[in-house]
Image (tube, coloured by chain):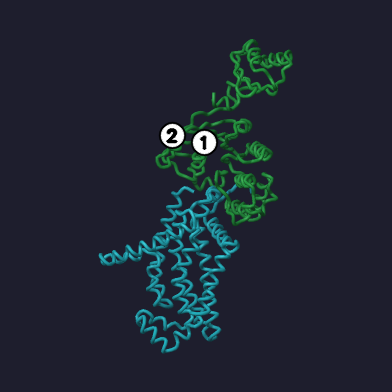
């Protein structure tokens, strides 16, 4: 059974069409990224998948059921954007309620609430009220609640936005660790992060699904992304272009170059590059096989 | 338990109702509201209710009251075996619905505005959220009604100990009748608080609805008396008639409130299913 199936999915708010005829079919497995500019319809798509809102046209099926169906309760979880916990109760009480609603007994619910809080390093804050938490801590609590009962599908809307680098890393590690049991769909503007986490990237623009990129497509073999330390870009461009089997080299960002080649031999280009660096005493920072997600999406 | 094997709707409805009661009783805002409620009732109990025996049992006062309001309007009032409960009955019939509008105004509005429902709807059905909250608020009001009735019984018994049994019987009937009266108010407030963005807004909508409907019904009654029965659609329309009833006779008006509640709950259920949370 497919994890998610959308056919002709559209959503309008008054005269504004937030989603236009989105067709989508996703299988359970590696984390899936949802990317797009502000206002592209990412949160609307998430809200439709969670059943918070109903589509204007088209249909959605999650694990064969309509969003909001009783059969999906406890199997799908989400970190919603702009949602906060009840300020009247401490974090633990609310997480225990959520777990109890998912069918846990009272004792098990408490253990489960503490388990998910410790996953995000917040077991110490269990007795605090939501208002006393910082923005980042509140976000981690919201991520923790999405993990209660190990659901099959977890939708994370900008999970690391507003988190400090150490905690953002921790969340990425958590997603990687849980990815075997749970399929994550992650919406984020941080392409580097998505590149590390996800196997597939969906690109949404002006309410339409314009691209679906797989991280391990065959085209990866034709590209190398080279990042140098201090260098003279013109010299690099000329020297690399002079190497055999190089189709093109393009300067991207600061000291970053995208090389396209047609070499059939494994590591031939990489070896040639290392010889070149050694000969000229150039310091490289990184060589990435393939293109960065940013290049894939925007070139 | 790793996954959630069952999601029992009824169990979750009761869980949410219980959580709502806890919210009212154990958080500062709820406690302040309860303290205000207790103070108002203390005043009512100490003055009009405690002095009730004097008013209702002294023939000269009785003649005076009948002279002012007419025997048809207040006749039943003198037949109550426990005078304190008679006065309590009048005060509570008007005051509790008013309290209900304020108490039940935040059944959904703050949680909806804050997005808190988004944490609940993936774990439990919207039906259980709707009915859980409604039941929770009815439990809170039942507790408040029962406490004030008990306080009235204590007042009556402290005057005359032989009144214990009639006070308990009457008190029970008053309690059940009042709960029935409050049902449609709470159900209407559930719908309004689903629509509103804050409790205050829901209260304002409630005042507007009651005022607008009373005026409309008044106009219709005046020009088209043939459809005067339309008045029964407004929650609380039976209250003025209930004042001059007592005991089992008061239950004659229960079907009106129960029917209103059923219709309102059905509408509310449809609304929460369709609304964006």
Q: Which chain is cyan?
A: B
Location of residue A30 in the rendering, given as x and y in whole percent from the top left corner: 60, 33
Q: Which residue is mark 2?
A: A21
Chain identity of mark 2: A
Q: Which chain is green?
A: A
Along the line of sight, the residue nearer the viewer: A276 or B170: A276
Q: Residues within 10 Å of mark 1 (few under 14, many from 20)?
A: few
Question: Compared with residue A63, is residue A94 higher up or lower down, i.e. above or below?
Answer: below
Q: Which residue is mark 1?
A: A38
In front of the other: label 2 or label 1? 1
Location of residue B146 in the rendering, given as x and y in whole percent from the top left corner: 52, 72
Could you say which quadrant of the image residue A274 lies in? top right
Is residue B109 shown left or right of residue B231? right
Mark 2 falls on what kind of element? strand
Location of residue B197 in the rendering, given as x and y in whole percent from the top left corner: 48, 53
Q: Quadrant of the C terminus of chain A?
A: top right
Could you say which quadrant of the image residue A257 lies in? top right
Location of residue B150 in the rendering, given as x and y in whole percent from the top left corner: 54, 76
Residue B11 makes an appearance in the image: yes
């Amino acid at each position: 059974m497919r994890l998610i199936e959308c056919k002709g999915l559209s959503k309008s708010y008054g005269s504004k069409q937030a989603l236009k005829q989105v067709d989508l079919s996703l299988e359970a497995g590696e984390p899936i990224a949802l990317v797009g500019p502000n206002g592209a319809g990412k949160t609307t798509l998430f809200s439709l998948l969670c059943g918070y809102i109903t589509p204007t046209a088209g249909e959605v099926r999650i694990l064969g059921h309509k969003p909001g169906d009783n059969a999906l309760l406890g199997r799908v979880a989400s970190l919603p954007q702009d949602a906060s916990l009840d300020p009247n109760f401490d974090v633990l009480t609310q997480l225990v309620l959520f777990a109890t609603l998912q069918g846990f007994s009272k004792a098990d619910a408490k253990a489960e609430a503490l388990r998910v809080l410790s996953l995000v390093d917040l077991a110490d804050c269990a007795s605090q009220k939501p208002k006393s938490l910082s923005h980042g801590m509140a976000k981690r609590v919201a991520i923790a609640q999405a993990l209660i009962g190990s659901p099959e599908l977890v939708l994370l809307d900008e999970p690391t936005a507003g988190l400090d680098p150490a905690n953002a890393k921790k969340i990425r590690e958590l997603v990687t660790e849980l990815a075997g049991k749970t399929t994550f769909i992650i919406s984020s503007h941080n392409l580097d992060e998505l590149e590390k986490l996800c196997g597939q990237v969906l690109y949404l623009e002006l309410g339409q699904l314009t691209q679906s990129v797989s991280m391990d497509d065959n085209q990866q073999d034709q590209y190398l992304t080279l990042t140098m330390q201090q260098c003279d870009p013109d010299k690099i461009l000329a020297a690399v272009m002079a190497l055999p089997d190089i189709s093109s080299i393009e300067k991207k960002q600061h000291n970053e170059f995208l090389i396209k080649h047609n070499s059939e031999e494994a590591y031939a280009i990489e070896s040639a590059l290392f010889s070149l660096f050694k000969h000229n005493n150039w310091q490289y920072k990184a060589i990435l096989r393939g293109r960065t997600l940013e290049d894939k999406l925007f070139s | 338990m790793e996954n959630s094997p069952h999601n029992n709707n009824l169990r979750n409805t009761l869980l949410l109702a219980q959580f709502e009661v806890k919210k009212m009783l154990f958080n500062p805002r709820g406690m302040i509201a309860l303290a205000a409620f207790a103070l108002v009732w203390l005043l009512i109990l100490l003055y009009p209710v405690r002095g009730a025996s004097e008013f209702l049992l002294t023939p000269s006062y009785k003649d005076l009251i009948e002279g002012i309001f007419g025997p048809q309007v207040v006749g039943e009032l003198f037949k109550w075996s426990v005078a304190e409960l008679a006065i309590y009955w009048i005060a509570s019939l008007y005051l509790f619905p008013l309290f209900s509008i304020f108490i039940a105004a935040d059944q959904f509005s703050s949680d909806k505005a804050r997005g808190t429902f988004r944490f609940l709807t993936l774990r439990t059905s919207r039906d259980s959220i709707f009915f859980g909250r409604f039941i929770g608020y009815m439990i809170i009001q039942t507790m408040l009604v029962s406490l004030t009735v008990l306080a009235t019984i204590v007042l009556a018994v402290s005057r005359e100990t032989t009144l214990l049994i009639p006070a308990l019987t009457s008190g029970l009937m008053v309690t059940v009748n009042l709960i029935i009266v409050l049902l449609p108010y709470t159900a209407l407030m559930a719908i309004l608080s689903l629509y509103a963005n804050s409790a205050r807004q829901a209260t304002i909508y409630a005042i507007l609805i009651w005022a607008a409907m009373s005026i409309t019904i008044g106009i219709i009654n005046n020009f088209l008396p043939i459809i005067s029965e339309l008045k029964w659609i407004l929650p609380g329309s039976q209250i003025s008639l209930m004042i001059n009833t007592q005991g089992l006779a008061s239950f004659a008006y229960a079907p009106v409130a129960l029917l209103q509640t059923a219709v309102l709950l059905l509408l509310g259920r449809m609304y929460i299913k369709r609304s964006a949370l």
